[in-house]
Amino acid sequence: MNKIPPPFIAIGNIFLFYLSTLLIPSFEFTGQTILGILIGLEGIIIIFVSIRLFRDYQTTINPFKAHETSKLITSGIYSFTRNPMYLGLSSIQVAFGIYLGAYVSILLIPSFIVYITNKQIIYEEKILKKEFGDEYINYLKSVRRWI
């Protein structure tokens, strides 16, 4: 199980993106800033929509307290991805990687996805299988982990 809150890992990666641009020349292309901003907004919207659903269903949002989940959310954005908050964090990292022109983001974003999948998502899935049984197993079969 992961011991570091996923948003902190994403922020750490973004900081590393910035530091890398001080050491390695950045890439540049036309529309780079606008693309970065649009992808960042998409990531923020995904996270806020996800949080709103958790609050509407009055269940825990804390990834370290998955055992306190009181409702299985399968509607809205959760009918497209099982992990929209992690998807949103990944999108925000992509946005900063593009905005900053950080080559290191090409390595760190996939590393984030692999780490979160193996150290957080799989842990959460085991707990949710115990809590919700067949309902969750059917959900696993019909909705992808990421996208």
Image: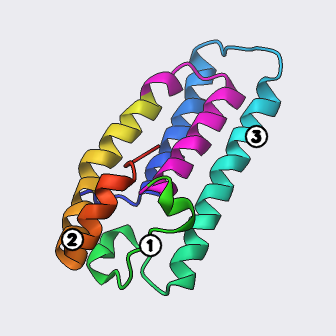
17 or 85, which is in the foreground?
85
- Number of other residues with Cα within 10 Å of mark 3, as a class: few under 14, some 14 to 19, many 20 or more: some
- Residue 7 in percent (x, y) is at 49, 56
Q: How much space separates mark 2 and mark 1, taking CA atoms?
A: 14 Å
Span of residues in magenta: 82-107
Residue at mark 3: 38
Residue at mark 1: 73
- Number of other residues with Cα within 10 Å of mark 2, as a class: few under 14, some 14 to 19, many 20 or more: few
104 or 84, which is in the foreground?
84
Q: Can the viewer see residue 51 in this picture?
A: yes
The amino acid on which the numbered mark 1 sits, given as a three-letter code, is Ile
Q: Are marks 3 and 1 in contact (CB under 8 Å)?
A: no
Q: Secondary structure at mark 2?
A: helix
Q: Quadrant of the N terminus?
A: bottom left
The image quarter in which residue 63 lies:
bottom left
Q: How much space separates mark 3 and mark 2, taking CA atoms?
A: 38 Å
The amino acid on which the numbered mark 3 sits, given as a three-letter code, is Leu
Residue 134, numbered label? 2
Q: Comparing marks 3 and 1, which lies closer to the viewer?
A: 1
Q: How much space separates mark 3 and mark 1, taking CA atoms?
A: 27 Å
Compared to residue 138, the image places residue 144 above or below, namely above
- Number of other residues with Cα within 10 Å of mark 1, as a class: few under 14, some 14 to 19, many 20 or more: some
Residue at 77% across, 24% down: 32
- Residue 70 in percent (x, y) is at 36, 85
